[in-house]
Image (cartoon, rainbow, N blue to C red):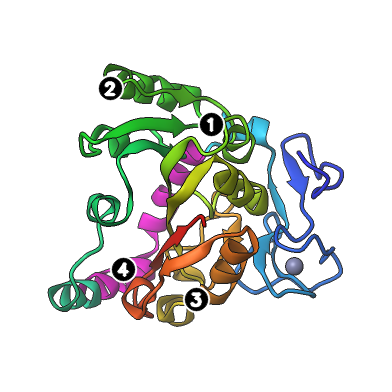
Amino acid sequence: MSNNSSHSASANTVRRLCPRCGSDSSAQKALPYGSTEWPLKACAKCEFIYLEIVPAYAALAGELGWDKTFAAWHTERAKDRYHVLRSRLGRTVRDQLRTVFKRTTMESLLLEFAAPGNVLDVGCGKGTQLENLPETYVPFGIEVSPEQAAHAKAAVAPRGGQIVVAPGAEALATFPPEFFSCIIMRSYLEHESEPVRALNGAYHALASGGVLLLKVPNYGSLNRRLFGTGWCGFRFPDHVNYFTPGSLRAMVEEAGFSIRRFSMRDRWPTSDNMWMIAARG
Ligand SMILES: [Zn+2]
């Protein structure tokens, strides 16, 4: 871990300073959404929302890996009848909205914004996204779980791509400068304990004019306010950063990017997630 973290809370966890500005919020009262084990804090200085204690990188490849903790979280969730009702209601609202607003897909964004060339999917899992990239792109991926990375390797090898098995922020820095025409961070940045390092790494690895396609849960959404602790964006300890439209925009711009698209439809208040298209140079 970098100097943005202090001593281990236990062998498998790390106590973080604010991942955006580096301030110590250990004296701050935890927000009502977290738990004793996984306190959620709002930074006293920059107001960024984050889990103060997070799994260490080493634990992410093992027992605290999101693929394993998500299964446990999902099983617990299914027992909560109140949650089932809330999610049914949410689905109905979403279905209605989808008939009005066309759904954003990664493929459509790539073709609209990214020039042909090397494309990197950070947190690529088994490589499903990479496998489906249009033919004008060479697929590359970063994945922290060795089991998932093995699947992804098999998927990208025939197209000349590679998979790096390492934590996202660390791996991003290992690519040559200006190597990619596009970097995809879809459902990744909320998991990354060092989001600023990851964004800086993406800036370094993108070619001039290259684009960063981002999708993260929207802590500022109406859904979070309505559903409270039952909001689907709360996953402890998998999701360690909780972005609002304001904090996401600020962090991406602080890394040097310019925002290409972040319209109302990309951050619609009743959507659990938000999309952003940013560019280098
Ligand atoms: Zn802060």
Q: Quadrant of residue 64?
A: top right
Instruction: Say whether disc 2 or disc 1 marks the residue closer to the N-terminus.
Output: 1
Q: Are marks 3 and 2 in contact (CB under 8 Å)?
A: no
Report crowding for label 3: few under 14, some 14 to 19, many 20 or more residues within 10 A (C-alpha). Answer: few
Q: Which residue is mark 3?
A: 228
> Which label number is shown at residue 87?
4
Q: Are marks 4 and 2 in contact (CB under 8 Å)?
A: no
Q: Is residue 206 left or right of residue 159?
A: right
Provide the residue span drawn in magenta: 66-92
Q: How many marks?
A: 4
Q: Does the segment drawn in magenta span residue 79?
A: yes
**Three-letter code for the amino acid on which mark 3 is drawn:** Gly
Instruction: Say whether disc 4 or disc 3 marks the residue closer to the N-terminus.
Output: 4
Q: Is residue 158 left or right of residue 214?
A: left
Q: Position of residue 135 (x, y in %)?
A: 20, 34
> Which label number is shown at residue 144?
1
Instruction: Say whether disc 4 or disc 1 marks the residue closer to the N-terminus.
Output: 4
Q: Quadrant of residue 138?
A: top left
Instruction: Say whether disc 3 or disc 2 marks the residue closer to the N-terminus.
Output: 2
Instruction: Say whether disc 4 or disc 2 marks the residue closer to the N-terminus.
Output: 4
Query: What residue do we see at 64% from left, 35% from top?
Result: 170
Q: Which residue is mark 2?
A: 159
Q: CA distance from mark 2 to mark 1?
A: 21 Å
Q: Quadrant of residue 27?
A: bottom right
Q: Position of residue 118 (x, y in %)?
A: 38, 34
Q: CA distance from mark 3 to mark 2?
A: 44 Å
